[in-house]
Image: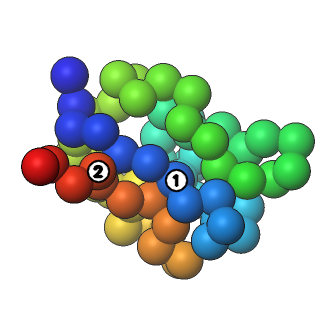
Amino acid sequence: MAKAFYVDEEECIGCGACVDCSPDVFHLNDDNIAEITNADGASEEEIQDAIESCPTECIHWEDEG
């Protein structure tokens, strides 16, 4: 199981970069905001690529602790 991560919906601008990187993990909802549909749909490396592709840096790993 991948590390936990989340989308800060208040920061998301709906650009879709995360969906382009990991379409099995993310989708844009009816408000054009990124949501996680399948947290186990990609490797941690692929999720990190999606995190790094986000221009507003609204996708984050959960703090462990």
- What is the secondary structure assignment of the residue under circle 2? loop
Indicate the amino acid at tag 1: Val
Left or right, 8 with respect to 46, comes to: right
Which of 20/9 is in front? 9
Left or right, 31 with respect to 63, comes to: right
- What is the secondary structure assignment of the residue under circle 1? strand
Q: Name the residue at the left extreme.
A: 65
Q: Which residue is mark 1?
A: 7
The Cα–Cα distance between marks 1 and 2, rounded to whole angstroms, is 10 Å
Q: Which residue is mark 2?
A: 62
Which of 25/4 is in front? 4
Q: Name the residue at the front extreme.
A: 65
Measured from the top left, where is residue 15 in percent x and y? 69, 64
Q: Badge 2 local density, few (<14 within 10 Å), some, or many (20+)?
A: few
For the N terminus, which image quadrant? Answer: top left
Q: Is residue 13 above or below residue 63?
A: below
Indicate the amino acid at tag 2: Glu
Query: Label 2 near label 1: C-beta < 8 Å?
Result: no
- Residue 15 can be seen, yes or no: no
Left or right, 20 with respect to 64, comes to: right
Q: Is residue 39 above or below residue 65?
A: above
